[in-house]
Amino acid sequence: MKKYAGLLKYELKTLFKDSMTLFMLIYPVMMLFIMGFVLPEILEKTASADTNATTYTLLIGFVVVLSIGGFISGAMLGFSLLENKDENTLVNIAVSPITVTGYTNFKILYTYLIAIMGNFIMVGGLKICATSKYQIQYMGQTINLLESLGWGHAWVFILTSSLIVPLFALVISSIAKNKIEGFAFMKSSGLIIMLPLLTLLNAFMDWKQYLLGILPNFWTIKPLLNLVLSLDSSSNLPFYGYMIIGGAYALGLSLLAYRMFLKRANLK
């Protein structure tokens, strides 16, 4: 345990030295400011509260906030592992008491906790600071997205959605040869995290929603949209049904990515 305490001390000491890591750490605060204050202010000055433009813009902003936390933290971990690969740090770790497996497990847990913090800043921060701003007209009803989201459901979402961190990180670090390729992969996959928005289309309101189930973040975002928009369909699962499947799915894919990472590293 002492060796991991020393590793944690080292990670915290170097946390603010890398500009990419520093940017990803402050990203949740930036997103909270943009989505909680800047976006509602712009919409308030440019469109009336009952326009479709305002409704869809706020819905897209809401889904971005739900999607981005685990994505950014996963990218941070992926870049860190790629940096270890570039500098041959993993070779040194392989012959140390920690081992590559122990080091990777530590980094995954460490970054998962950062993802929880980032998700809380964005989702919890919006709920605390901008509840009154996220009021929309949807299917003839006035809905407050953040008021409908209770803290219990919010915390279940935060903990479950953060499980995507090791999956995204280990895929990046396994496929990309360096941080430049990793950054390109992150940019190209950014669109994928927004695809759960398709569940708002009538075509995906019934059983066809599960065609999007191949996306890990579908299983955590869909139940929140069902909850805050009061979407009622016989094809929908209970809130915790989606979350349990989503958590198990993310962990299963992460395990496969974990094995692929260790295999490609050629180390144990």
Image: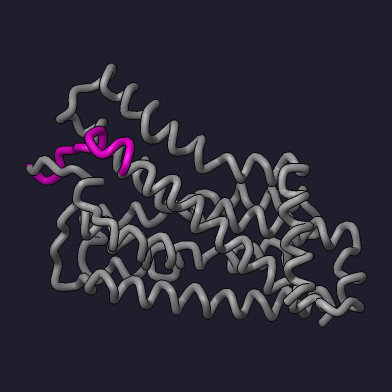
Residue 193, position as x, y percentages in the image: 47, 54
Q: Is residue 157 above or below residue 133?
A: below
Q: Nearer the viewer, residue 189 or 127?
A: 127
Number of numbered discs visible in the structure rendering: 0
User: Residue 93: x and y, percent?
Assistant: 87, 72
Quadrant in which residue 155 is drawn = bottom left
Q: Residue furthest left?
A: 140
**Residue 143 position in % (x across, y down):** 15, 43
Image-quadrant location for residue 268: bottom right
Question: Is residue 56 shown in magenta?
Answer: no
The outermost residue toward the front is: 2
In the picture, measured across the screen, residue 195 lies left or right of residue 57, that is: right
Q: Which residue is found at the position 21% from the left and 59% from the top?
A: 227
Left or right for 127, reference 27:
left
In front of the other: 176 or 35: 35
What residue do we see at 28% from left, 73% from top?
240
156, 197: nearer the viewer = 156
x and y, in percent, of residue 76 in the image: 66, 53
- Does 161 appear above or below 104? above
Magenta segment, which residues? 128-140
Asked if residue 264 shows in the view, the reply is yes
Looking at the rendered image, the quarter that the N terminus falls into is: bottom right
Please tell me which residue is depicted at 78% across the width and 65% down the height of the picture. 6
